[in-house]
Amino acid sequence: MVNIFNYIERRSAIHSMTGAAKLACLLLWTFAAMVTFNTPFLIVLSLLALLLFPLSKIHLSDVKVMLVLLLSFMVINGILIYLFDPEHGVTLYGTRHLLFSFGGRFTVTLEQLLYQANVALKYTATIPLIMVFVASTNPSEMAASLNRIGISYGPAYSVALAMRYIPDIINEYQDVAHCQQARGIEMSRRETVFKRMKAAAMIVMPLILSSVDRIDVITNAMELRKFGINKTRTWVMGRRFGAMDIAALLLGAGLVAYALIFIFVNHGRYWNPFI
Amino acid sequence: MADNIIEFSHFGFQYNAQKLPTLYDINLTIRKGERVLIVGPSGCGKSTLINCINGLIPFTYKGEITGSLKIDGVETRQQSIAGLSHVIGSVLQDSDAQFIGMTVLEDIAFALENECVAKPEMLQRVRQVADIVGVGSHMSYAPTELSGGQKQRVAIAGVLVDNVKAMLFDEPLANLDPATGKTAMELIKDVQDRTGIAAVIVEHRLEDVLHIDVDRIVLMSDGRIVFDGSPDVLLSASLLTDHGIREPLYITALKYAGVAISPQMAPHSIRSIKLSPADVAKVCAWHGRNAKPRPHPDREPFLTIKDLTFAYGSRPLTLRGVDLTIDRGELLALVGRNGAGKSTLSKVICGFEKPNGGTMALADGDLAALSIKQRADHIGYVMQNPNQMISKIMIYDEIALGLRTRGLPEPAIKEKVERVMKVCGLYEFRNWPISALSYGQRKRVTIASILVLDPSMLILDEPTAGQDFRHYTDIMEFLRGLKGMGITVLMITHDMHLMLEYADRSVVFCDGRVIDDETSAGVLTNPAVIAQASLKETSLYDLALMCRIADTAGFVQGFIDYDRQVRR
C-alpha cells in the first residue's frame, strides 16, 4: 500500500488533541510564517515544527513519500527563484555584498542567500506541521470537531468518507491497471506522454464507472441509517476541548501576534542584518 | 393486529421509467419474530419488494404504488426512509460497500450519531450489539482489516443498534465462502432468538439458507407471489424447478432415485428428512445403476508450477511453496477460504506480482521470463466485476482493444472480433453500446475481450457471482464449450455447486499451500479437507451416509453425471 496521505494511529499528546484545534493552530502558524521575513523567528518556528515529529511519535519513515515529494518541490522552487532573479535579495535589502559570480547576471550575493534561506525556512516551519497534522488526525474526529465549531456536518462528513475509501480505490486502481496492461495498454516510460495520458484515461474510466456504483450503494446505506435527518448530529469519535487544545490556540495566536508586532516595530517585514 | 410488522395488501408498483409494473397484486404478511425466505429468478421483483419495505421505494426510486403496504401499522407512503428505519433494518448485498465508518465502532454507531444520541449512551448501546454479533473485540478495526464474515456481522450490528423490529437481508451469502455462509445463517438465527425480531432474507442459494429453519418460503416469479408457505410443502412440489430455482441437491437426488417427496418427510433439511427403508433401498439401487468406473483422460501439462512462494512487501508469505500442474483443456476450480492465496496465485501467474521463489513453466518455455503483455497472449485473466474491465463505450471497440494495441490491421481485427462475438453469443449486439447490456452480458463482453487474444488458458475470478440459476447455467455451459475448443479454464470460486458440476478437478488452498488436488466429488466428501479449507460438505454426502453407501465420492460423482444427462 502506498502511504502518501494517511492517518496513523498512535498514542501521543498531539494525537489526543482535537482536529479543530490542530487545524486552527496550523492555519495561524502558517499565516505567521508566511507574513514574516524575520529570520531568527523563522529559525525558532522551524525548530519547533521539527520538534513535532518526536512529540507526535510520527517517524520520518512514516511520511517518506510525502517528504521526498515536498523536498524535491522545495529544491526546484529554490532554483527557479534564483534563475528568475538572482539579485532579488539585493533589491529587498538595499545593499549588495557580492560573494562570487557564475558569469553574466548569475551573481551570488549574501542578500540573495539570506532571502532564499528565508524562503526555505518558511517551508521548514510549515511542512512538518502539515505532515504531522495529517498523520495524527483521525478524519472522523476531525469531522466531529469541525462540526462542533459550527461547520455543517455534510461537508465535514464527506471528507471523512473520502479518507475511508482512499485505500480501496488505490487497490482497485492497481488491479484495473494490471488488467489493462495485460490487454496491451502500456503505462511505462517508453511510451510518449500523449500515449501514456490516453492509457491513464482507459484505466480511470472503469474506475469511475465502478466508483459511481459504489456511491449509489453508500448513499442508500447512509440514508437507510438516517444520515441527514437532523440539523446536527453527535459523534462517537468526538472529543471535548482540553488544555492542550487551548494551549495550541494560544500558541498560534501568540505567533501571529509576534509576527505582526515585529513588522510594526521593525517598520517592515524583513529582518535586515546588512544595515 | 399489532403483531403484523410488514403487511402488503393488493400491492403493486411501477417504476416511472418502465412501461409495465414490476410488482403485481402482492399479498404478504410478516409477523413479529418470523423468519421468511424470498426466492425467485433474476428480475422477478425480489429486490423491488425489499426496497418497498425499507422505503427506498418510493422515496429514492420513484414510481407509482397501488394497493397498500403497512409497516408497523402505518402506510409507507405516509412515512419517510428515516422513519421506516426505526422499524426496518436493511443489510445490503455488498457488506463492504455499505461499511460507512472508518472503524467498526463508528460504523455501528452511525445511526445513533444521526439521531443525536449522547456519546456515553451511544458507546453503551454499541458495545451491547457488538457483543450480540461477536465483534466486541474488534472495535477499532478498519474495514480492510476485517474478513467478509466480520463485515457482515458489523452490518447486522449497525441496524440492530436501532432496536428495529425486522431485518432485511439482500443476498447475505453472495460474497462469503461456504463455511462463513453457514456461520452467517446461524448468526441470523441467533440474533433473532435473542431479540425476537423478524428476518426477511432474499437469497438464491436456497440450500445454504435452509441450513437454519425458516418459517416460510415466498417464491416470486414475474412480479407476483406464486407460493407462500412452509418449506416442506414447497420442496415436495415441483414449483422451484418450474421457476428456474435450484432445489437442494439431496432433493434432486431423491427424485432421480424415484423417491416421492411429501411434506410429512420434513424434507426442508438433510438433517430433518425422514426416509423409509423403502426410500433408502431406492437410493441404493439408483446408486448401483449409476456407479461406473471413470475413464482417466490423457494428461498433457500446460502450466507447471513448482515451489512458488510470494509475499506482499515485507509481510508474511501469502504463497508458501505451491506445487501445481494445470493440464491442457481442463476446467479447474481453485477453492479455499478468503485470503488463502487463490487470487494471489492468479496474479503471480499473470505477472501482476513477482514471485519471491519457485518456477512457473509453460509447455514451451519459461513463463517467468515473459512480460505482463506477453503472458496475456498465453493466459487471459477475467476480473470478477466486469465494470472494472470495461473502458470503451461500444461493445465492438471493447473487444477489439487488445488487438488494436497489438497493432493488427483493421480487417483482421474485424474478422477476429466477429468470430469471438459469435462464440460468446454477442453477435446480435455488435453495434450496441455497453451501457445497454445486463451485468451477465457485460461479463461475457469481458470474457470476449480476453478470448479475442487467443489465449490457451483463461483465469476467471468468481465467474458466476450474483447470477441466478439460469444465467449461471448459461455462463458455465459457455465455459464448458471453451474447454471443447481446447482452452484451459481456471476458476476461482466459493460456489460448491459450480465446483461439483463443472470442474474436472478441484485444487484446495489453505494458508498459501495446496492441501488437496482431486475430483470435486472427492474433495466435498472429505471432512478433514472441508473443515481445514472452510468449505461445506455437500448434502449429497450426508444422503449417502444416511443410506449407508460407503463410496460417498462415487455416489456424488454418479449424481453429477446423471444430472448432466437429464438436464441436457
Image (cartoon, rainbow, N blue to C red):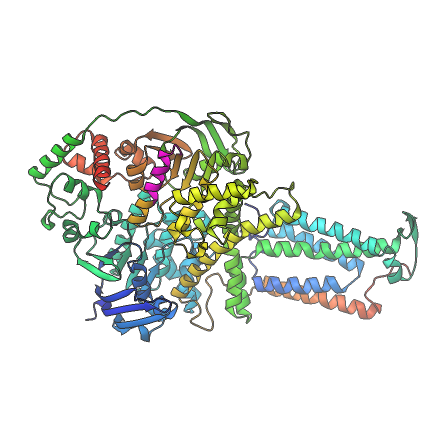
Q: Report the front residue among B15 and B262.
A: B15
| Residue B233 sits above or below residue B352 on the image | below
| Rendered view: B436 above or below B304 | below
Q: How many marks?
A: 0
Q: Is residue B479 magenta?
A: yes
Q: Which residues are magenta?
A: B475-487
Residue located at (39% from left, 42% from top) = B423
Q: Report whether A145 appears left or right of A49.
A: left
Decide whether the magenta segment is chiefly helix, strand or loop: helix
- On the image, the x and y values in percent for residue B323 come to 42, 27
Percent of width and height locating residue B69: 26, 70
Name the quarter where the C terminus of chain B is drawn: top left
**What is the x, y in percent for residue B14?**
32, 68
Residue B471 in sight here:
yes
Task: Determine which quarter of the picture holds residue B251.
Answer: top left
Q: Is residue A183 visible?
A: no
Up-down relation of residue B428 to residue B479 (above or below): below
Residue B392 at x, y = what percent? 51, 52
> Nearest the camera: A3 or B45?
B45
Residue B57, compared with residue B94, is above or below; it is below
Quarter containing the N terminus of chain B: bottom left
> Relative to residue A65, is residue B304 drawn left or right?
left
Q: Residue furthest front?
A: B411
Residue B370 magenta = no
Residue found 75% across the figure and 50% down from its top: A76
Nearer to us in this view, A231 or B295: B295
